[in-house]
Image (tube, grey):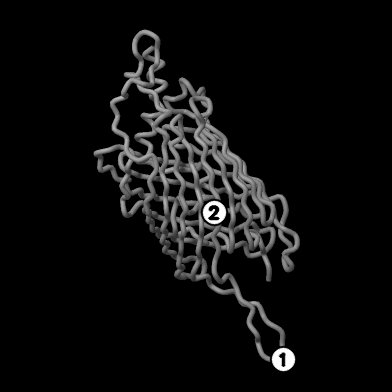
Amino acid sequence: MKKICISLCGAFIIATNAYSQDMHFSQYDENPSLVNPALTGANFVMRASVIYKDQWRSVTVPYKTYGASYDMKFKASSWDKVDPFRTKAYKKAFNRLAGGLAFYSDKAGDGNMGTNQANLSLATFVKAGDYSSFSLGLQGGIVQKTVDYSKFIFSNQYNGTTGYDQSIVNGEHFGSQSFVYPDFAAGLLWNYSKDEKAIGENNQIKADVGFGMFHINKPKQKFLVGTNEQLFSKYVIHGKLLMGIPHSNVALVPSILVELQGSSKEILGGMMFKYYLKEDSKYTGYVKRSSIGLGVSYRYKDAVIVSALLEMGHYAVGLCYDINTSALTKVSTLRGGPEIMLRFNSANPFLFQK
């Protein structure tokens, strides 16, 4: 009976503590709104993606997280009229502003604890050299939290004879089952991008390092009556490097993410190996470069993550799986959960045009 009570109460214990932590994805670099507002428009002229994560199906009611995001640079380039007698000429412009919109939804555990979130972000860029720039990002969001208290089961609701009796008072003082609050974030990013000098050289180097702060306003949480719980501010440090191995079809992509929120922390580091399948056409861009990537990451004291990324011109498909390595393996038997991502970006991230 003790084991049954513990397992049934587990979802509530997780739920009542989970609101101090944020939703997250293993393919975190595909969700700039959750990592650093300064990443808005930093890597693509335009990017739209959807993502889905399913986890802990082997342990309890599966946690399901959905996301959709869009960001773009307001002016990627321009066509200028040279004079009245000639056609327009292409002139590359430095992108000084970018904006983004993102939506996320999460359902967790037996109590259907839910988070629905919409973020609007804006980033401005300052050139720091021929290949580098700094960007500052600001983000405002609206968040709705929900929970169904009727789904919870407590150990003191077992009468000792016939079993569970929902009519027995559980002794908890619940507050609202749904509430809404504003949420604000800001971030700073340094970006470096040096493309290959000629087709086939594969000597490009791209890197970014950033710092983000979320829940600046520390919004109050209202699940329990008589408490003044506030959402802890979250601090994020992240970095990523793409380095092509000259005169080969291979590139290395190491990355790291550190998140600190109250007493909770997440440290994730990994490496992806990219293999380029096809080169861009040098002048027209009609032939699109494509690549396939295989990677492995480790989330400290939690999971090993294996991933694959297929990029074909404007499109990308990402798959990964969390192999649980924490103390929960006694019931999860290593099964964390799958995640899938679909992305469309324009202009082509590999495009090489004169």
Residue 169: which quarter of the image? top left
Could you tell me residue 309's position as x and y percent?
Answer: 62, 45
Is residue 307 visible in the rendered image? The answer is: no
Could you tell me residue 350's position as x and y percent?
Answer: 65, 59
Q: Earlier in the sequence, mark 2 or mark 1?
A: 2
Could you tell me residue 121's position as x and y percent?
Answer: 46, 60
Could you tell me residue 100's position as x and y percent?
Answer: 51, 60
Relative side of 58 to 219, left or right: right
Q: In which quadrant is the C terminus drawn?
A: bottom right
* Front in this rendered view, residue 108 or 295: 108
Tally of marks: 2
State yes or no: discs 2 and 1 in contact (Cβ < 8 Å): no
* Front in this rendered view, residue 272 or 174: 174
Instruction: Give the residue at x 66% y 90%.
Output: 83
From the viewer's perspective, is residue 173 above or below residue 274?
above
In the image, which is nearer the foreground, mark 2 or mark 1? 2
Please state which amino acid type lies under the numbered disc 1.
Phe
Asked which secondary structure carries label 2, the reply is: strand
From the viewer's perspective, is residue 198 above or below residue 228?
below
Relative side of 333 to 200, left or right: left
Distance Cα–Cα, label 2 vs label 1: 43 Å
Residue 69 numbered mark, or none: 2
Residue 86: which quarter of the image? bottom right
Most extreme residue toward the top is: 161
Please state which amino acid type lies under the numbered disc 2.
Ser
From the image, tell me which residue sits under label 1: 85
Relative side of 306 to 354, left or right: left
Q: In which quadrant is the N terminus drawn?
A: top left
Q: Residues within 10 Å of mark 2 (few under 14, many from 20)?
A: many
Is residue 327 visible in the rendered image? The answer is: yes
Instruction: Give the residue at x 64% y 63%.
Output: 347
